[in-house]
Amino acid sequence: MAESTTNKAASTAKATAAKAQTTAKATASKAQSTAKATAKKATDATPRSAKDAVNTVVGFGVMGVNKVQAGARDLIKSVKADELGSRITKVVDQATETAKSTGKQADERIEAVIVKAETAFAPYEEKLPAQVRDLSRKTRETSAKVREQVRTKVLA
């Protein structure tokens, strides 16, 4: 009987050891599954996080490039507007100088014609009646004043 109790105790110990071993294997397997799942989640999350970070950096880069391009377009527009303004100013200045030069030449020619006409008309003016002669003289004086005012305003 002592042998049988010893056998029973050994058997029970073996069964308990087997059960403990099975439980340990199951727990280890469960822990291993949990570790794998956690590692998989971490592994899956790491590339996703890295991908998100890269996408964020690229997004900021694209926004920065767009902002620089918009600034460049605005700068080009303002430079073109400034160039256009300076070109228009240059053309207007040239046109003004040409008009003044042409006006001075025309004034000189007209003045020469007036002097010739007055010189040619002077002998006949003396033969006119006094009232007509006075009127002719006042007309010449008035036209000379008007021409001088035109010269001052237009050719100055």
Image (spheres, helix red, strand yellow):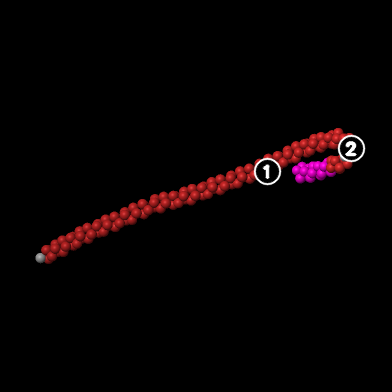
Circle 1 packing at 10 Å, graded few (<14), some (14-19), many (20+), is: few
* Quadrant of the image containing the N terminus: bottom left
Q: Report x, y in % for residue 135.
A: 84, 42
Residue 78 on image: x %, y %: 60, 46
Relative vertical location of residue 127 with respect to residue 28 in this rendering, above or below:
above
Residue occupying image coordinates x 56% and y 45%: 73
Q: Is residue 104 left or right of residue 52?
A: right
Q: Magenta part mainly helix, strand or loop?
A: helix
Residue 7 versus residue 42: which sits nearer the camera? 42
Identify the residue shown where x is 33% and y is 56%: 38
- Whether 19 is drawn above or below 148: the answer is below
Q: Which three-letter amino acid code belongs to the residue tagged 1? A: Thr
Instruction: Return the x and y of residue 71 as percentages of the image width and height.
Output: 56, 48
| Residue 144 vs residue 49, the one in the foreground | 144
Q: Which residue is mark 1?
A: 89
Q: Nearer the viewer, residue 54 or 112?
A: 112
Which mark is first along the chain, 2 or 1? 1
Residue 28 left/right relative to 146: left
Which quarter of the picture shows residue 80?
Answer: top right
Q: Secondary structure at mark 2?
A: loop
Q: Is residue 33 visible?
A: yes
Name the one closer to the observer, 66 or 95: 95
123 above or below 44?
above
Residue on which the image places disc 2: 126
Q: Nearer the viewer, mark 1 or mark 2?
A: 2
Compared with 44, 107 (above or below) is above
Q: Is residue 151 magenta?
A: yes
- Amino acid type at circle 2 is Glu
Q: Residue at x 27, y 57 (%)?
A: 30
